[in-house]
Amino acid sequence: MIEGTGAKLNHVAIIMDGNGRWANERAHRRVWGHVRGSSVVSNIVEEADDLGLKALTLYAFSTENWSRPLTEVKTLFSLLKKFLKKERARILKNKIRFKVIGDIDKLPEETKKLIVDLEDETKTFEGLKLTFAFGYGGRDEIAKAVNKFIAENPGQPITQDAICANMMAPEIGDVDLLIRTGGDQRISNFLLWQSAYAELFFTPTKWPDFTREEFKKIVVDVLARERRFGNVAATDSLSESLSIAEKNKKELEELQTRSH
Ligand code: FPP
């Protein structure tokens, strides 16, 4: 966790947007933007590690992205493969715990194997939790978590804790800061459950132009924001706010019983 005067940050999630427009502005095909964007990914992972973040989740391919031209889809597949091959040694050296959330079923066998092997090799690592959302949709993840719980606990009422525990990567926890590059101000079905109390930051910078320096500046700016989680004063975490809420509710109940 890194702490500022206000917020504390464990988990940062990024919607890496603007690749296509970046390329078009330079009279290139959209896929060129993805190619340039993929080299930015390595820099941002390195900066997240240097900043001491606990988790970084990157939106690399959404369930909606399946509707893009096949050449673009294939380019994204091959960039993921290249990244895995190129960064494997660095991920192992820095004890980064790597995971992919989403549906990787349609990826080529070789890429699937690279993912599964790296997930397996890094699953006990205690460093940065680096998660790629690929073939991912937030609603899909919630529906799958609920169905998994129902299948394993027939007839039991579902709770918020049960949904958290059945997420695709429960260990990454709630998102503290959600950044979107590229100028649009939307969440686009990314980590919907985990972002309930996330600080949001939208930058006009398109992903291929996003730098370690801008990333660090955003993190530092957000660290100065006060987070209240529904309380009136700064509160350390959502769970602290919820436990204060429970305590208050109990006290109110006791007062009501006494006054009857
Ligand atoms: C959005 O830009 C970006 C994506 C759909 C893919 C993000 C992928 C990368 C940054 C590279 C992949 C790298 C790895 C390592 C998996 P857009 O095309 O929607 O941009 P636009 O809004 O300008 O059209």
Image: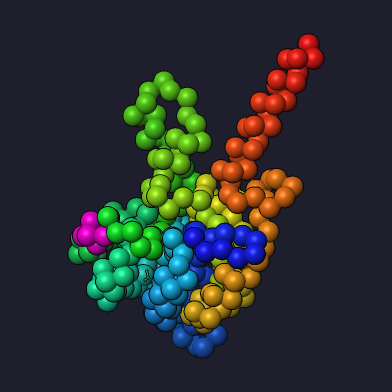
Q: Is residue 218 left or right of residue 167?
A: right
Q: Is residue 193 above or below residue 187?
A: above
Is residue 3 magenta-colored? no
What x and y, as percent, mark residue 71?
35, 72
- Ligand 1 is found in the corner quadrant, namely bottom left
What x and y, as percent, mark residue 33?
45, 79
Quarter of the image containing the C terminus? top right
Q: Main secondary structure of the magenta part?
A: helix
Which residue is at a point 26% across and 60% down the rendered structure image?
122
Q: Is residue 196 above or below residue 36?
A: above
Which residue is at a point 44% across and 60% down the rendered structure image?
55
Front-lying residue, 163 or 29: 163
Q: Is residue 22 left or right of residue 228?
A: left
How is the protein colored in the picture? Answer: rainbow
The quadrant in which residue 130 appears is: bottom left
Residue farthest right in this picture: 259
Residue 158 in sight from this viewpoint: yes
Region rendered in magenta: 117-122
Residue 68 in sight from this viewpoint: no
Residue farthest top in this picture: 260
What x and y, as percent, mark residue 92?
26, 68
Front-lying residue, 225 or 40: 225
The quadrant in which residue 226 appears is: bottom right
Which residue is at a point 40% across and 47% down the rendered structure image?
170
What x and y, as percent, mark residue 165?
41, 40
Q: Is residue 153 above or below residue 11?
A: above
Which residue is at a point 64% across and 38% down the rendered structure image?
244
Q: Is residue 141 left or right of residue 4?
A: left
